Structures are given as C-alpha cells and as structure tokens.
Amino acid sequence: MINKPMIGVAAAVVVIAGGTWYYLHNRHAEVPNVSVQPPPAAASDEAAIEHPVPAASQTAASGPLPALADSDAPLIDALVKIAGASAVKDYLLPDSVIRHFVVTIDNLPRQKVAVQKRPLAPVSGSFVADGDELHATLDAQNYARYQPLVAMAGKLDTQQLTAVYLRFYPLFQQAYQDLGYPNGYFNDRLVQVIDNLLATPQPTGPIVLVRPNVMYTFADPALESRSAGQKLLMRMGPDNSATIKAKLKELRAAITAASPKH
C-alpha cells in the first residue's frame, strides 16, 4: 500500500489513508475532526497469533530501538535511505509517525478515519464532481491527483522496506496495544486491513454521487456502506486501484511469510 510495511503500506495503504482526508470532499467544505474509538479488544494470547513477523525482526536491529516517543527521527532517517529525502518530505508527516500509522491502519476497514491522525500529507488538488447536489458523477480528473504517490509506491524496494518494518516492529506493536488492544497483535490487524482493501469492488461506468449534507457520498447504498479504505480505492480510478492492489498483495505475502498457514 514490504516487504514494505512502512512506506509500502504508507505508500500503498496510506495512499489510501492520506487520500481519505479528501473522501468525496467538496473543495469548499471543512473536514470535521473525527475521533474514532476502537472497540474493546477481544481476549487473545500468543497462541491466537495468525501471522507472526519473522523471528529476525527481534535481532535485525543495529543497536537498541529508541523509545516509541523518540522514534520519529530514526524511522524517518531509515525511510529517507529507501525512498529518498524528497519523497519523505513531500508525503510523510513527521510527528508521531508510528502511532498515526497504527491508528490509520486500524481505522481503514471502518466507516470513519480519524483524519487528524493521518501519517501522510493529503494529496494535492481539489475534489471534482460533474453535476449538482442531486445528480452528480465522479470526475475522472480526480484520478490524476493520486498518480504521483501511486507511482512512488510502485518504485520502493521491497526487501529494504521489510527490514525497516521488522526493525521497528516492536514499536508498532506497542502503539497498537496502547490504542486499546492490550492482547492484540498488530501484524494480524495489518493483514486483516489488507484483505479488506483487496476485496474492494471496481465499479463499472460512471460513479454516481449525491450530496445530502456537506460532503458528496456514493449514491449506491451498497458502495456507500463499504469501508473508508475501500471507498477511497474505488474513487482513485481503476488504474491507480489496480496498482495499489498489486502492491498490497506483495505486502501481504511479505508480512505473512513467517506464518505456519502460509
């Protein structure tokens, strides 16, 4: 969206997360801050882990990990070596990167995403709809807004990004438990989210919109009931969506490599 789970999901999944800030949004509208509360965590233990990260994730680090509160600078340094300083500067918001990434991943399969917690900057440009509040369709001009980020995601080195994810994985796990899942396992949640995104349908023909309030929504209730991540994938356009899905399949294979089931 690693073996890319950081910028890979932060450039594949978070192409989605960053774009969700503009979810069917009119250019003149204000986006409300949405505070998404996670549900109570289900009882779990080590035996319930479905997709353990490779054991090497605990030994690959060169030196001790920083504390979660101090992890932004070393993580950004690691990502700059992989994606380049320009890409990191242009797309990554530099504060609380791991916590915001974890919150966004956890929220993508839900109806709402806490946009104030996004790890990436929103895509540039304004949302464009053809028509009015009662009869509108999604303008294909919107697809171009996502192309630079999608193209960048496709060029990332899978093996290097995997190493970054595995090195920092204990901090992702800590942030996930702090979110309200004391017995949860973040890598399992990440796989669940990727599966949800891969199940996104691709509408055929124009995407019809309505605008009952401030923001446009899908006119088709079956599409509007989809998760926030799926709705963004649908409105990114078929080519961008296909690229992201292909990358997500790579990510899933990488982060489930240690699972006995795979």
Image (cartoon, grey):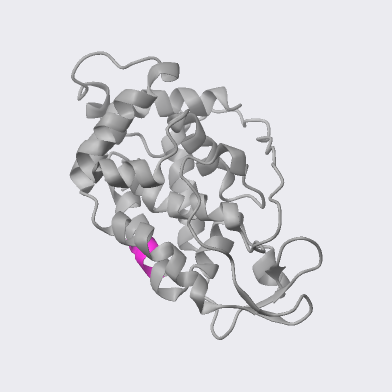
Residue at 56 percent across and 86 percent down: it is: 205
Q: Residue 215: x and y, percent? A: 72, 62
> Left or right of 237: which side holds 206?
right
The percent position of residue 146, horizontal first and vertical second, equals 43, 63
**Residue 170, percent from left and from top:** 37, 23
Q: Is residue 124 left or right of residue 34?
A: left
Give the overall secondary structure of the magenta segment.
Answer: helix
- Of residues 244 and 81, the one nearer the viewer is 81
Task: Please tell me how many numbered marks the rendered image carries.
Answer: 0
Residue toward you, 41 or 116: 116
User: In this rendering, does residue 30 appear at all?
Assistant: yes
- Asked where in the image residue 250 lies, by quadrant, the reply is bottom left
Q: Is residue 183 left or right of residue 254?
A: right
- Asked whether residue 261 is in view, the answer is no
Q: Residue at x 65, y 69 (%)?
A: 223
Is 38 one of the magenta-colored residues?
no
Point 54% across, 36% down: residue: 103
4 relative position to 199: left or right: left
Q: Which residues are magenta?
A: 242-246
Residue sitting nearer the eye, 149 or 253: 149
Q: Position of residue 64 (x, y in %)?
A: 26, 13
Q: Is residue 102 above or below residue 218?
A: above
Residue depicted at x 37% and y 50%:
11
Outermost residue on the front side: it is: 28
